[in-house]
Image: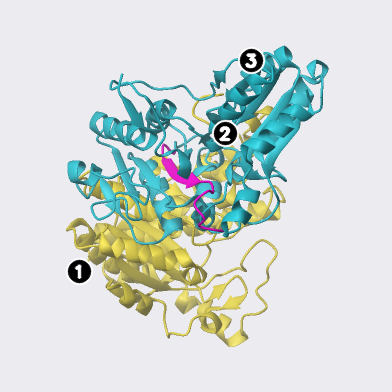
Amino acid sequence: MTVDKKTLKELYTRTLKVRRFEEKVWDLFGENIVPGTLHLYLGQEAVAAGVTTALKKTDWIQSTHRGHGHVVAKGADMNAALAELLGKASGSCKGKGGSMHITQFDAGVLGATGVVASGLPIAVGAALSCQMRGTDDVVACFFGDGASNNGTFGESLNMSAIWKLPLIWVVENNLYAMGTPIKMMCPSANIAQRADGYCIPNVVVDGNNTLAVYNATVEAVKRARAGEGPTLIECQTYRMKGHSRFDAAKYRPEDEAKHWLSEERDAVRIIREIAIEQGALTEKEAEKIDSKIAGEVEKAAEFAKKSEYPKPEETLEDLFAEVL
Amino acid sequence: MPEITYRDALKAGLREEMLRDERVFIMGEDVGLNWGGAFKVTKGLAEEFGEDRVRDTPISENTIAGAAVGAAITGMKPVAEIMFGDLITLAMDQVCNQAAKMRYMFGGQTSVPLVLRTVFGGGKNIASHHSQSLEAWFMHTPGLKIVVPAFAYDAKGLIKTAIRDPDPVMFFEHKLVYDKKEEVPDEDYTIPFGQARVRREGADVTVWGTLFMLHKALEVADELQKEGISVEIIDPRTLAPLDTKTLIESVKKTGRLVLVTEETKTGATTAEIAAIIQEEAFDWLDAPIKRVNAPDTPVPFSPPLEEYFIPDNKRIAQAIRDIM
């Protein structure tokens, strides 16, 4: 599939934006101003960037506990996103959600969830809603390799298939469910083939290659908008950091980590080289985009730091539409 | 005014709301053409509104509930049915972690206007997995509204309010009230949440109860009237929001309170009501608060066992006499 230069530039920009955002989160964490825990998206940027670039603004995504990258890639306001991570009143969830619920509805994010595999049923309902309301919107549902062992995986894939829902199932296979290797917990060579049992077309792509993810998603979106039903895309990728805040990921074999974390496998580098090679970017333009994004992220961090914490009594707000 | 059954009153309410608002749709196991719901509440609706809006689902409770969440947050008004209340255990994540929390943990960014109907209660000899009364679990979950209609008039008015409500509503029916008849207006009416109804006025003792136990309490009140005991009976109609004002006023008048539900005793809704009354109306009590509940066991099968398990008129009457 040939991809125009503008799109290639966008794929690079989005991949980089997620990377710089997460690097900033890591820095802020180092400053000890991020409460709670974090599941960083570093290393998996190509998945969020590739999928969301194939979507339009009114399409929806369903996120996970490792959701910062999804939300940023879908076009969320970075000020509100970073402020949320710091627990500030100006955060997108007014400081009530934090890292695991970093949602921006108006950017088309249905939610980020702390319960692994709980997003799949919600994506089914959102896609059913898109279908019943007669829109041409689609839903992309992100989930990890670990989630594919949960009961909702079977329930939700089945329901999406029988109703031919406009859904793209995106498995981010980063090889580990927390510390457990997927090869210990899944008998098949890949996760994608599980979709065969539900008659859902499926494909395995390099999840560190934004262009490969984008191309697969474009095909899936085409099918979904044409009323032909769901597709499952397995994106094989790797975390640059551990599972959460204090995990050094020592359980990953050295040679495996060395391979995945090498420069050749770096998502930003891969899409940058493709874009330059295909004439969509010059080195100079690439640098310019980088410094522009770095500036935006820096501003967002300043905004988040300067923002106020919510008032303690705001604990009691937002439970129901009206106060009872 | 026509006398119709509770079942037909519910159906009339559902039908009127489906005519009124095209976003309203029904989904659940066997709710559609072939069956019309295990208790026939939706019978005929698929014929009238089509199988898209009265939608049979696979046996996938967690995804039924989750799909209702996803549809609700994207512009639809789903009425999901879980065939038996006992099976809601399979949907607890979507009900309690997602539907109940979404508005709050996303800082008010979204509403979850769904209704989840299910049926509680014993009396049909269908044992431990088809007879429980689990209201208290949901009363312990902030973010849910809980409706417990015991009479046909309330069933119609409350289902209509539930469907129009912007927040998630748990709508709990009882197997033994579907055939109970009452005068129900043909026209449109709604009943506000959080308003108890005094089913019978009395001077000596207040009985607060829910669902089928109210029907028994009314019979008991007639019996005790002959002994010169005047019983006031209060039906909360909704457990969340809870009308404590009507109950407190009644207790201040009678000085005595008996609480009757079909739940197992420990941690039941009756325990919460007893706690509220001792906090709010302790000085007006002339006797200890009495609870009439099922024993702390699963619901047994054999008729003499089940009869022993479910509170009967004799036990309710005895509890009242004990504190006179």
Q: Are marks 3 and 1 on the same chain?
A: no
Residue B216's mark?
2
Measured from the top left, where is residue B184 in percent x and y?
A: 35, 23
Residue at the spot of label 1? A2
Residue extending farthest front:
B226
Residue at the spot of label 3? B202
Q: Nearer the viewer, mark 2 or mark 1?
A: 2
- Residue at mark 1: chain: A
Measured from the top left, where is residue B192 in percent x and y?
A: 46, 22
On the rendered structure, is A198 left or right of B114?
A: left
- Residue at mark 2: chain: B
Label 2 element class: helix
Magenta segment boundaries in residue numbering? B112-127
Relative vertical location of residue B164 with respect to residue A247 in this rendering, above or below: above
Image quadrant holding the C terminus of chain B, namely: top right
Amino acid type, label 3: Gly
- Residue at mark 3: chain: B
Relative vertical location of residue A235 with respect to residue A303 in this rendering, above or below: below
Q: CA distance from mark 2 to mark 1?
A: 74 Å
Chain for colour yellow: A
Q: Residues within 10 Å of mark 3 (few under 14, many from 20)?
A: some
On the rendered structure, is B221 left or right of A121?
A: right
On the rendered structure, is A309 left or right of A119?
A: right
| Secondary structure, magenta segment, majority class | loop
Q: Disc 2, disc 3: CB below 8 Å?
A: no
